[in-house]
Image: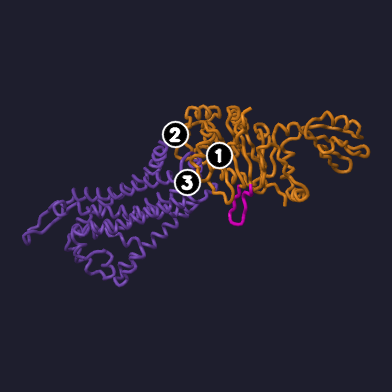
Chain colours: A orange, B purple
Amino acid sequence: MPAVTSLVETKGLTKRFGSFTALDNCSFSVPRGEICGLLGPNGSGKTTLLRTLLGFMQPSVGWAKIDGHDCYHQSVAAHRQVAYLPGEARLFRRMRGRDVLKFFSQLRPDGNYPRSIEIADRLGLDLSRQVARCSTGMRQMIALSFTMAVESPLVILDEPTANLDPSVRSEVLRLVAEAGRRGRTVIFSSHVLSEVERVCDRVIMLRRGRLVHSQRMDALLRQHRIKAQLTGPLPEAPEELADQLQVRRVGRDGLEIDTPGELTALLGWLATLPLAEVSVSPIGLQTVYDRFHHDEHHHDEQQREAPIVEPLDDELTIASAARE
Amino acid sequence: MVFWTLWRRTFRDAWWLMLGCALVMFVFQWVFVWLSSFLPSSSFLDLVQDLPPELQGMFGMSLEQAASPVGRIALGYVDPTVVLIASLWAIARGSDAVSGPLDRGTLEMLLAQPISRLQLLAAHSSVTLIGCIVLGVALWCGTYVGIQLVEVEVTRFWLLKRMVPLTELIDLRHFVPAAMNVIALAICTAGIATLVSAADRYRWRTVGIMGGFCLLQVIIKVVALGSPGNDWLFYFTYYGAYWPQRMAVEPELAWGMLLQYGGLLTGIGLACTAAAAVVFARRDLPAPL
């Protein structure tokens, strides 16, 4: 089996603006071929992280590398590996859509004008229109067309589906998935969890500038939440299950049990419990996201009590784990 | 290849402004030459001799020099219209170097490509430099066409008056250093504007800063010209190195003056552009608002 190498790697990446720390000691890596989702609420540092990766900002501390090239000091070499779509693409207003595609294709050795035209057609774009007369969504689609056409190893997409209508969103997600199948690495920042669930292999979550969690999507799909009403006293979980389960009482009679994977062993124990109205559903990304972001104050309390970071794979090291 | 793609794009962006400014320079100087032909030297001298000494100093040359055919045409080179157009080009282009595309949000799209910041600034500054040269050439061409088409009345053999083409009285080469001084002024202003732009985030603010700065510099020069005892003020304005009219009327000293004044202005402009490159290369680029 070939060794997995990282295309993107950061170490202790920190960005401060005066006394405000936008990015705090972030260390992570993204292996080649992975579609990595980047999640976090507004102001959590997602865009700062992406802009630091693109060399637009000099890290206050730490470094970031793309294919071994320092993102700030060797930005041109790093950019040869990257196609980037900003959250809101601003293009040359006097150019027509077709000219924009041609211009950006010519700016890169790996630019592919015919392919960008093909993608624009898939998105249903009118390329004869001047950029100034295009809606925000149409400008985003123009930018998407040349970004996705570039044959670079890494694609960075900052909220690519913002401002797009639902049918175009689906097409964009298909493009992202295709990029992944072709072996390209994608960093996909979004607020739309369902989209991230659909295309990403892994998500990393940011909160107040810190990387707080990494979640492999295949592991998440194996996780389930069991909800039920208790009709009697709840006995202790068997020893072999106890450390895998998260059991919570909800209200007076409610019960929630989160399980990390295999249900077979659990079902036997469940059958012995005094339960009614039992439902089993997969844990979605929303649940994981809410653990870190839904109630920040509550989360701060939790953080003091227990570590919140559980690295789920070897490639990830989250040095910003809050263990204060 | 990548650089030329970028350069062509930058040139296309600047083309209409360059064309407009050059056309205004050309037409203005042509009309200026034509209008100045209506006023005979003697009448001009009579007119200006009655002015207070403070205003006489504004010509930047002796009254006899100003009243000569060359002097009257050379006054077009220090006319506010010429200074304004040169400054307009320089500030418009200089402010568009960094803070312009940063403000519009197009900078991050460009810099996300394998293009260095220095390449981007070099493409922009080279187009600005070409525009400065084009403006100077347009001004000289306006002078050339005006002189070719205008005749003036001259008195010869005591009372004999006759019309002669201006070309017989004026050597057009005398206006070459003057035009080059205008180019140097535009380069200087553009360089300073580029430096401010490299450190700034909003183009409107860069334009405001530069507009105010240029106005202040002009005021300092006007005060210095109007009060002969305050020559030291020339050291506080880069317009103190802008003497195209003197270069035209003193051709024997013109190239030396151009070397001194034009060199100084060009040097300031290039030094500021180099400083802008350093500032731009080191600064953070915030997300567009």
Q: Which residue is mark 1?
A: A66
Q: Are marks 2 and 1 on the same chain?
A: yes
| Most frequent secondary structure within the magenta stretch | strand
**Circle 2 marks a residue in which chain?**
A
Q: Is residue B23 above or below residue A274?
A: below
Residue B40 occupies which quadrant of the picture?
bottom left
Checking the image for residue A106, the label placed there is 2
Outermost residue toward the bottom?
Answer: B229
Q: Is residue A197 magenta?
A: no
Q: Where's residue B34, x and y in %?
A: 22, 53
Between the residue at mark 1 and the residue at mark 3, the CA separation in whole angstroms equals: 26 Å
- Residue B70 picture location, percent across and down: 20, 57
Cβ–Cβ below 8 Å for labels 2 and 1?
Answer: no
What numbered label is drawn on residue B101?
A: 3
The part of the chain drawn in magenta is: A13-25
Disc marking residue A75: none
| Residue under the image location 88 percent in, 37 percent down | A237
Neighbour tally class for label 2: few under 14, some 14-19, many 20 plus, Cα within 10 Å: some
Q: Secondary structure at mark 1?
A: strand
The secondary element bearing badge 3 is classed as: helix
